[in-house]
Amino acid sequence: MKQYGAEFFGTFWLVLGGCGSAVLAAAFPGVGIGLHGVSLAFGLTVLTMAYAIGHISGCHLNPAVSIGLWVGGRFPANKLLPYIVAQVLGGVVAGGVLFLIASGKPGFDVAAGFASNGFAEHSPGGYSLQAAWLTEAVMTMFFLVIILGSTDARAPKGFAPIAIGLGLTLIHLISIPVTNTSVNPARSTGVALYVGGWAVQQLWLFWVAPIAGAVIGAFTYKMIAGDGK
């Protein structure tokens, strides 16, 4: 239960910190942090939680990561479903807290997006379903390679959180214009449920593509590095 609690609170922090930066700070007049700041915020949430709870739960914070680690032989199957449930619940509760904060400002309109992920007319740059699918799958694939490589027993010790956090920052710098960057079904679900409508209708892609990418990433790392533990 400590592991599941750690995943809940870690994913809560990821959604509140990452999506919160996008909703509250990205376009703040005069000092908005923009795409670069939001990208860094997502990376910092993972980096800080990796040091805070990595020794408790492994700090997955992401159903796709948990599935990828299972495929890669790093995670037991009997913990997979409870981890995913804890992560999604953490994301949804964080989305609710963010909604309460954001709605305290006059004129707040959740229909504007609320940091949800989307494609076609709901992509920040108007990118197609095919482009969104490929982006989410490829970005998650490389995220898994980074995670598996930096936590390999043969890798330098103590630096994995930095590599993983900076990796997620880079992923956001690349893909925010395409999908608003998911690579994490719990992150997508955590805000989409409050937007409803199109965000929920398009949510399937931000489960299927990241999971597919994670599985490919796990097999890719095994192919190039063997069975590092």
Image (cartoon, rainbow, N blue to C red):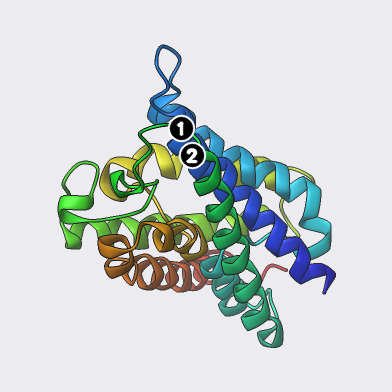
Measured along the vertical axis of the image, is residue 100 above or below residue 96? above
The front one of 11 and 70 is 11
Write the residue at 42% across / 42% down. 172
Q: Is residue 57 left or right of residue 66?
A: right
Pointer 1 and pointer 2: residues touching (CB < 8 Å)? yes
Q: Which residue is mark 2?
A: 102
Q: Is residue 167 visible?
A: no
Question: Disc 2 marks which amino acid?
Answer: Ala
**Which mark is nearer the camera, 1 or 2?**
1
Q: Secondary structure at mark 1?
A: loop
Q: Which residue is mark 1?
A: 105
Q: Quadrant of the N terminus?
A: bottom right
| Quarter of the figure with residue 101 | top right
Write the residue at 66% across / 86% down. 77
**Image x and y of residue 114, in percent:** 39, 46
Write the residue at 50% across / 55% down. 143
**Residue, far bottom:** 78
Measured along the vertical axis of the image, is residue 144 above or below residue 66? above
Q: Is residue 107 left or right of residue 119?
A: right
Write the residue at 68% across / 73% down. 74
**Image x and y of residue 48, in percent:** 71, 42
Q: Quadrant of the C terminus?
A: bottom right
The front one of 4 and 218 is 4
Q: Is residue 163 left or right of residue 155?
A: left
The front one of 113 and 203 is 113
